[in-house]
Image: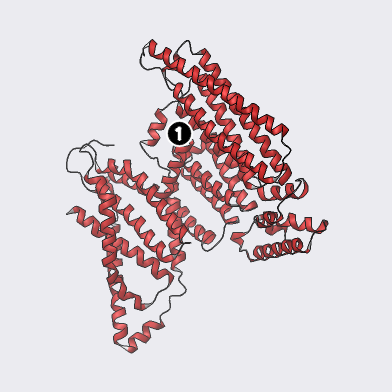
Amino acid sequence: MDTLKIILKSIVLSTTIFWIIIISKDFETDMLYLIPLSWIPISLCCLITICITVLPFFSFKPDKYTNKAVFKRYFPFYSIVCFGLCFYASYNSKFDIDLMSFLASAFFTTTYTWVLFAKKPNEQNHLED
Amino acid sequence: MKQLLLIIGAILFSTLFYKQNMGLNLSIFSIFSTILLVIYNKAAFKRKSSKAFALVYFITALMVFFYQSNLSIITNCIAFLTLIGHISEQSSSVYINWLNGLYTSIAGFIHRYIDIQNNDQEVTKKQIDYLHLAKIIGIPLIVIIVFIGFYKNGNPVFGELISKIDFGFINIQWLLFSIIGYLLFRNISKPVQVNPATSCDLNTGNNLVSKTETKLEHLVKENQLGFILITLLNVLIVFFLITDITYLMSSQDFRAPAISNQVHSGINALIASIIFAIIIILYFFRGHLNFYKANKNLKIVTYIWIALNTLLVINIAVKDCQYIYYFGLTYKRIGVLIYLILTVIGLITTAIKVKQIKNLWYLLRLNTMTAFAILIIASTINWDNHITNYNLYYAQSMDFKYLINLSNNNTFLLKNYAKNTPLSVDKNTSIDEKHKNYIDKLKDHSWQELQFDNFKLK
């Protein structure tokens, strides 16, 4: 249940960041209809990305580790790789605003998801990092 | 006060970099970042090493102002990461500084937030609920905007009224850029560490330690194998050097393709031989053989091998210098010389490792630091200007198109050369065109993009 909540929060954040950046470039009221529609692909992207790249760190962690310990151990490398890939893609697209809005929302959403998972209460007694 | 500093930083970040090219802005950013780091980390800046790294960072920023080359911009970024990483942990290796610096710049604030969450969870909960605040502002705002969209097409009067509202004076992109600036300064204000990488690095010394006893028979066999192998390799490299030097002395063929082939094939041989040399030395001196009393002969042949490899490097350097003398300087030829310098340093540090019984980490630390120092030195040199100056006044022949295609750093030098030397019409036209384009570009610079050459304009 907690995991579902976290994913929902991430989808909201992702959509918000995506549209703020798109609107900052060029705002037309006709675009407003697209916001609810965009929830479907954004939700799918979020769900797949989180389930594949973030959730396994917490789901398959050794019992002795707390969520905070998992965060401190793996998040630095995850964030560096994620930032590197996003920056590389932005640079290759010559900082195209549409792609950048997607990449920025992806980076901030995954980061936010890590924070939410790290804050999730632990079920058993664990070793601190 | 500190929060105010971050907000000023965010506004400054947008003012300096939003839709601007690199120039004076990077120098101002460097000064502000250093001031911010000093204010937030006063204790760290009491050490001389932190001051030295800050100075190096500032020098690289000045080089961007002077030369604006890609090399100086990349070096400035690396110096920035090194400084931040060094503040996070003063005793760690330079590559760990880069890791810590990069992580701090990307997600330092989030890392600290998680730390605070766990330490003072109770206290934090009593503070302002930002999520709720975002919800009560954000959700109604989004819903209202969506409904405005619906109603706009339903009623022409309402639609006309809505279309008259103009928020054009607000530049959302500029604001978003400021938020990124704020996040960056917030991240770097208190540098964090990547663990367990940092703690592992701190716990790993530079010296090899004899841990367990090994069978003497095994050591004798390994010592024999090492001695025979390295002695044979010495003989081989001597033979190679004799034939190569003989060829070099007797050859009268100074055509570009001939020397080019020599230099390039020499470099390829060198790369392979040096890598293998270091791997073989590291293999034999990885553990117990360092402490074996009868390893004197093995050490002697190893030093001879390192010396012969250094001779190989000198041999290649001579070829490269000949090439440069006859056909002028290019980035590739300078790159070869820099690679040769790094190779000699690598060989010397390997010799030190064997003599003083150091471990692999020692080699990695020392060589990474050396590479960093060479990068900093390289960024302080106006390469385009030096290449042009050498090729125009000292080289026996040169490729004029190559000089025209270099960055604008050689424009004034080329213009001066054209004034004082009779040139063909084509060459004069190319120089004039390059000069005119550069002057136009300099005149178009905003104050953020100013560079040293702007002040040379009359």
Residue B51 seen in the current view:
no
Is B189 positioned to the left or the right of B263 in the image? left
Which is nearer the eye, B405 or A34? B405
The image shows residue B48 at horizontal and vertical percentages of 55, 34
Residue B252 falls in image quadrant: top right
Q: Is residue B250 above or below residue B79?
A: above
The image shows residue B9 at horizontal and vertical percentages of 49, 55
Which is nearer the eye, B23 or A38? A38
Which is nearer the eye, B188 or B418? B418
Question: In what quadrant of the picture does the C terminus of chain B appear?
Answer: bottom right
Q: Is residue B341 above or below residue A79?
A: above
Instruction: Assign a secondary structure to mark 1.
Output: loop
Q: Residue at x 53, y 26 (%)?
A: B350
Is A125 positioned to the left or the right of B334 in the image? left
Q: Residue at x 38, y 40 (%)?
A: B194
The image shows residue B180 at horizontal and vertical percentages of 43, 57
Q: Residue at x 59, y 39 (%)?
A: B265
Q: Chain of mark 1?
A: B
Number of on-image labels: 1
Q: Is residue B377 above or below residue B17?
A: above
Which is nearer the eye, A47 or B12? A47
Q: Residues within 10 Å of mark 1 (few under 14, many from 20)?
A: many
Q: Amino acid at mark 1?
A: Ser
The image shows residue B288 at horizontal and vertical percentages of 41, 17
Residue B292 seen in the current view:
yes
Residue B301 falls in image quadrant: top right
Q: Residue at x 38, y 33 (%)?
A: B199
Which residue is identified by label 1?
B92
Q: How is the image coloured?
A: secondary structure
